[in-house]
Image (cartoon, helix red, strand yellow):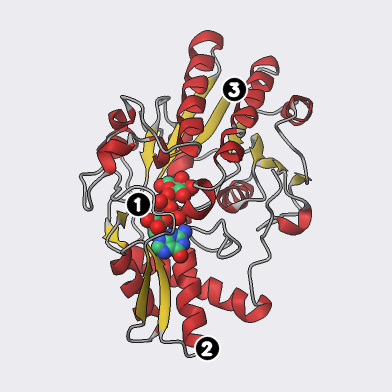
Amino acid sequence: MFNNNFMIKSKKILIVGAGGFIGGHLVNRLLKDGNSIVASDIKPKEYWFQDFPEAENHYAMDMKDISNCRKVVENIDYVFNMACNMGGMGFIENNKAECMQSVLINTNLLIACKEKKVQRYFFSSSACAYNTTKQKDVFIEGLKEEDAYPANPEDGYGWEKLFSERMCRHFQEDYGLEVRVARYHNIYGPYGTYDGGREKAPAALCRKVILAKKENLETIDVWGDGQQTRTFLYVDECVEGTLRLFESNHSDPINIGSDEQVSINQMIEMIENISGVNSFNKNYQLDKPKGVRGRSSNNDLIKKVLNWSYKMSLKDGLSKTYKWIESEMNQKGSNINRFTKS
Ligand code: GDC
């Protein structure tokens, strides 16, 4: 049930993947709420999106090595596993073996948590865990939690997420480690990747529009025919939902996503409006990675279990994201986050 004495305070919390997009936002929030944070990431310091000196930071630490897990899990109350080798469709479709090796991070962390008697563990799963045969049409019904089975997830990345969800479940059943599992639906916002190959559609399309406007181009490239659909959730909402879930008693996987389903063309139109440019010609690249045809989140369960729903519209979230990417591009020219090492 929803706990009204929200939020987590004065705890010692380990965040793995803290140098990444959602991990960085989570560290920020938990520090503000008065917790003591241990932050780790495989990425060296210069590739962290956000880096807070108040936290105990472990740069270039690989959790596929269990000795690293054992080291940082010592004396920790809660663990958030936000780490995996991932990206948008351009990355996960071409790096399936890399994506699947993230199973080692989750497995090693669970073992270390069990040994060191950590109270509660969070695993960041994905909408890619859902059965792909249920996502073959545009504007499908929102995916319900039970739609992950029978299993036929996104190849590579989605299989790793589904397997790791189950690993969490069995650690709770067999060893009493409390687990919480969220299935994130395409989270976007500032302090994330917008170029270099790992970027997802919202950031990639903001970048393309900003560049086209800057260089007076008439056309932008779009992967697929633009009619494929998705839902996108702003990162602050994702962090809020994650913390509320963490405090709840719900241990089965649950959607954290938006149900504002749009086609990629509709999202581009929103971005064009934000940019103040009327419209660019579209070069539809049908040979690029497209993923599933349609995807949306059904939010009945999270509303029931947490009595909570996100508020930020896609238009408002894109506007914030666009501004951040534009200012980064003005300062740096391109995204510094080109970290590709596994
Ligand atoms: O990359 P993504 O945001 O991942 O792509 C959404 C759709 O946007 C795809 O059909 C893609 O072809 C289209 N698209 C059009 N132009 C572009 O320039 C572009 N770049 C990108 N990247 N896409 C473009 C994601 C996973 C994540 C995560 C979420 C969970 O799948 O990649 O790792 O797990 O799902 O929902 P998407 O939504 O297919």
Report the amino acid beneath label 2.
Glu
Q: Disc 1 designates what residue?
A: 310
Give the residue drawn at x 43%, y 54%: 289
Tag 3 near tag 2, CB within 8 Å: no
Query: x%, y% of residue 92?
Result: 51, 46
Q: Quadrant of residue 133?
A: top left
Helix, strand or loop status at disc 2: loop
Which is in the foreground here, disc 1 or disc 2? Answer: 2
The C terminus - image quarter: top right
Report the amino acid beneath label 3.
Gln
Farthest residue in the bottom direction?
A: 216
Label of residue 215 in the image: 2
Mark 1 C-beta to ligand 1 under 8 Å? no
Which numbered disc, 3 or 2, marks the residue that appears first in the sequence?
3
Q: Is residue 327 above or below residue 159?
A: below
Which numbered disc, 3 or 1, marks the residue that appears first in the sequence?
3
Q: Quadrant of ligand 1?
A: bottom left
Helix, strand or loop status at disc 3: loop
Q: Which residue occupies the foreground of this view, 119 or 182?
A: 182
Label of residue 119 in the image: 3
Residue 234 visible in rendering = no
Report the amino acid beneath label 1.
Tyr
Query: x%, y% of residue 295?
Result: 30, 48
